Amino acid sequence: MTDIPTLDADDRRLIVATQGGLPLTPRPYHALAEQLGLAAEDVKVRLRRMLESGVIRRIGAVPNHYALGYTANGMSVWDVPDARIDALGEQVGRLPFVTHCYHRPRALPLWPYNLFAMVHGKSRGEVEAQIEQIAALLGDDCRARDVLYSSRILKKTGLRIGG
């Protein structure tokens, strides 16, 4: 069993303050420090510790791909051998146009797919070309495939805790 890190009240306040994103200012850690009554260096140390311990998974930009013109969004689904899924998934996940890549259980007999890879394009033609690149990479390991296109935008948020 892994050790569960101990979080104090300031850690919890920091999580609550950042769960919707960092402040959009030139110095976000300083803005958080001022908001929480902490030193900017303390905010950085606490976030680094929580990242290293796995309490938080990442700090990064999440662009709105629709606002950037990427309106054709396809979840490509692939039936690949289970014994090779980790290696194949790593290869597919490294492609520059794949934003999410993961293993999901099959739901036989109706759903044979076990590898999912999300791609975005400015047109369905662009997405189809990217999917062909994935198919070429998978080669004979690809037994079946399909693509599911987004039909509407859903608001995505992670787990939220109360303040």
Image (cartoon, rainbow, N blue to C red):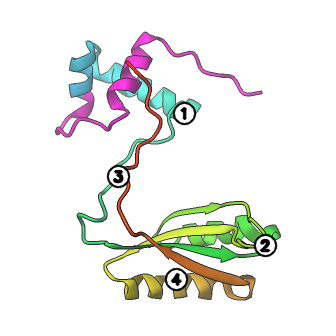
| Neighbours of disc 1 within 10 Å: few (<14), some (14-19), many (20+) | few
Q: Amino acid at mark 4?
A: Ile
Numbered range of the magenta stretch = 1-29
- Give the Cα distance between marks 4 and 3: 23 Å
- Give the Cα distance between marks 2 and 1: 41 Å
Residue 52 circle label: 1
Check if mark 1's residue and mark 4's residue have beta carbons within 8 Å.
no
- Give the Cα distance between marks 1 and 3: 20 Å
Residue at (21, 27) in percent of width and height: 31
Q: Is residue 73 above or below residue 157?
A: below
User: Which callout, 3 or 2, points to the residue nearer the camera?
Assistant: 2
Q: Amino acid at mark 1?
A: Glu
Q: Is residue 133 above or below residue 28?
A: below
Check if mark 3's residue and mark 2's residue have beta carbons within 8 Å.
no
Check if mark 4's residue and mark 2's residue have beta carbons within 8 Å.
no
- Give the Cα distance between marks 3 and 2: 36 Å
Which residue bears the numbered disc 2? 109
Secondary-structure class at tag 1:
helix
Q: Is residue 13 above or below residue 28?
A: above
- Residue 37 belongs to magenta span: no
Which residue bears the numbered disc 3? 62
Say whether disc 1 or disc 3 marks the residue closer to the N-terminus: 1
The spot of residue 112 in percent (x, y) is 73, 73
